[in-house]
Image: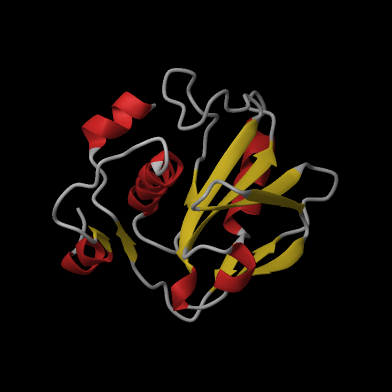
Amino acid sequence: METKAQQAKLRTSVATPILVTADNFNRAETHMYFQGIVKRSGGIGKFNHRREVTPIDNQGVIRANRDTLYSSAVFDLDAGPVTIALPDPGKRFMSMIAIDEDQYASTVYAPGSYTYTREKVGTRYVLIGVRTFGDPENPKDIEQVHALQDAIKAEQKNSGAFEIPNWDIASQKKVS
């Protein structure tokens, strides 16, 4: 159950729905995905760590890897820069992708500390997605992946808010 504070941080900024066209589809689609991540994470600026391999019949992205666990969060860069620290995964694959509201992306690899600003990203919001390789058939290996997920750290002075336009869902579905 969301608190009133969480509900206030997840809102649309316009009462009348905005028609989605080919010209603004990318932004509307991005906001739809970002909104889902904010909800699953329990708010803006919080990581949601998927603890199991993504089910084939319930994928948030096309063709999620069958040997990878995902972590994701959306950050409001108007609230200030965010620094993400990735732990040292040893020889295990761990990558991080930063996706802006226009669907431009950049990828880095663990370990390391990476800072994102509005100036660097170019949009108010940024999605941070972390992929960590694991053997879903080996419970001990998955425990190690969970420990790596838990070691991902985000530092930001405050989380800001998630305020997106009220996109018209019917027109968005037609354009897609």
Q: How many marks?
A: 0
> Does residue 105 lie above or below 8 as drawn?
above
Residue pushed farthest bottom?
Answer: 157
Q: Can residue 47 be spotted in the picture?
A: no
Q: At x 24% / y 47%, what residue is drawn?
A: 18
| Lateral position of residue 52 relative to residue 140, left or right | left
> Does residue 132 lie above or below 55 as drawn?
below
Could you say which is closer to the camera, residue 6 or residue 97?
97
Quarter of the figure with residue 78: bottom left
- Residue 174 lies, in percent from the top left, at 30, 25
Residue pushed farthest top?
Answer: 57
- Residue 111 lies, in percent from the top left, at 78, 59
Figure coloring:
secondary structure
Q: At x 26% / y 32%, what residue is drawn?
A: 171
Q: Can residue 55 be spotted in the picture?
A: yes
Image quadrant holding the C terminus, namely top left
Q: At x 73% / y 46%, what residue is drawn?
A: 94
Q: At x 31% / y 33%, what residue is drawn?
A: 172
Could you say which is closer to the camera, residue 114 or residue 92?
114
| Lateral position of residue 155 relative to residue 144, left or right | left
- Residue 6 lies, in percent from the top left, at 25, 64
Residue pushed farthest right?
Answer: 91
| Lateral position of residue 123 relative to residue 105, left or right | left
Could you say which is closer to the camera, residue 113 or residue 123?
123
- Residue 115 lies, in percent from the top left, at 66, 70
Could you say which is closer to the camera, residue 93 or residue 129?
129
